[in-house]
Amino acid sequence: MRNALASGTSGRSNLSTLPNLGATDVNGTLPCPPIAEFMSTTNYTVCSGGSLNFKDLSYNGTISSYAWSADNGAILANPTNSTTAITFPTQGVSSVTLTVTNGQGSSTKIKTVTVLNGTAVINGNYTESFENAGVPANWSVVNVGGGVTWDQTTVAAKDGSGSFFLDGTQSTASQQDILVMPIMDVVNNPSNLLTFSYAYARQTATHADKLVLQGSLDCGGSWIDVVSLNASTMASGSGGTTSSPFIPVPANWKDVDVTSYPYWFNFANSQSATFRFVFTEDATTGNGNRLFIDAVNFQNPNGLNELTKNYRLNLFPNPSTGETNLKFNLNDAANVTVNVVDMLGKNVLPATTINYNAGEQTIAINKNASLSKGIYFVNISINGAKMSKKLVIN
């Protein structure tokens, strides 16, 4: 066959010459219609009111025009550029569409974006000490493996009488259990500290459990590690190493200031920051020991301790099963306002404002025992100086 093509008979040898290939456009490239493709520069999950950036990845031909669109109320910054930013104000699913065109035709690509509720639940001072059975309001548990997972307990506590714990004695190798906090507004509370306490015991000296506090800026679309604690770090100064089921005593609790870790700065400007505790059981054997978490606080400490000392502010009994007393001392006459709010900042008792003379004062709180079991804040303003005391009702 090759010899026949190379033969000069009937001009066969001309078929493969460069002039002939060019004349018949065998060597040429015809213009083609483009094939649309694009990507988000981060991910496809976003908080309501948040934005994502998209860029064109179309191929197969030179593109002469771009047309971006999105539904569900989405707002596009540059709908005719090769890149665009899109803001998603409405919860739900939004379809993002890119159509690319040239002289030979056009092509369209559609991708979906999940828009989650980005409204902050925590907008100011907040605490959770797990006093009530079950998962707290606006928290969630992700039980990846379907086995034993996070649960409330009253066998030990750093604050109040309850805590959340994982019974690692029942966990399988590499089991992962997740505890997700409510969305919080960080940017409008720049002085607040995010802290929590934990107690942990290692089953053996080789158990490699790990606790990580992760943060998300896109309602859980992506996560970054903020605090990472290995088994050795957690056990040291806490429960150590023991094969007996661990029940912490007060000296076993360790405090963590999340805001002191370098990666906290990623969340300083966020109105919709989400955090979660991720515990991973030892990958080799599983069946570890126990981890307890308590006293999760997002609080502004500035000046509160000093003011509390100056006014000798005290709340007793606390915890209480009913009425409790707010006691304070005034050096001079003052206008005093007191209100009681729940963990979401909602007033649960009528606010009172009274002019007091100098001296020791006592105000009865929850006189009718109308507050249900839970955590509350008793807020007091003395001539504009604001303080707060946490109240536990059992």
Image (tube, rainbow, N blue to C red):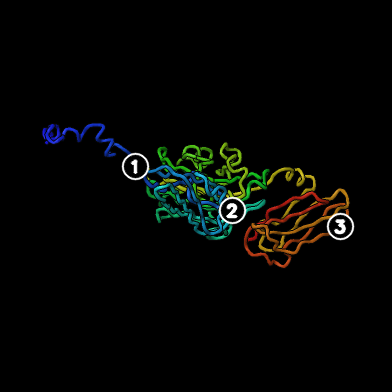
Q: Secondary structure at mark 3?
A: strand
Please state, as top left, top right, bottom left or bottom right, where the N terminus lies in the image. Answer: top left
In the image as oriented, which residue stretches furthest toward the front?
Answer: 10
Vertical relation: 274 (above or below) 8: below
What's the amino acid at mark 3?
Asn
- State which tag comes first along the sequence, 1 or 2: 1
Frontmost residue, 73 versus 365: 73
Q: Amino acid at mark 2?
A: Gly
Q: Nearer the viewer, mark 2 or mark 3?
A: 2
Position in image of residue 72 (x %, y %): 53, 59
Residue, x 50% and y 40% (percent of image)? 229
Of the residues under marks 2 and 3, which one precedes in the sequence? 2
Labels 1 and 2 touching (C-beta < 8 A): no
Estimate how packed mark 1 is, as few (under 14), some (14 to 19) or many (20 or more) residues with alpha carbons within 10 Å: few
Marks 2 and 3, how far apart in space? 44 Å
Pick the front one: 237 or 335: 335
**Residue 278 image offset from top left, x and y in percent:** 48, 47
Q: What residue would you read off at disc 1?
A: 30
From the viewer's perspective, tell me whether residue 45 is left or right of residue 131: left
Helix, strand or loop at disc 2?
A: loop
Residue behind mark 3: 355
Residue 150 in view here: no
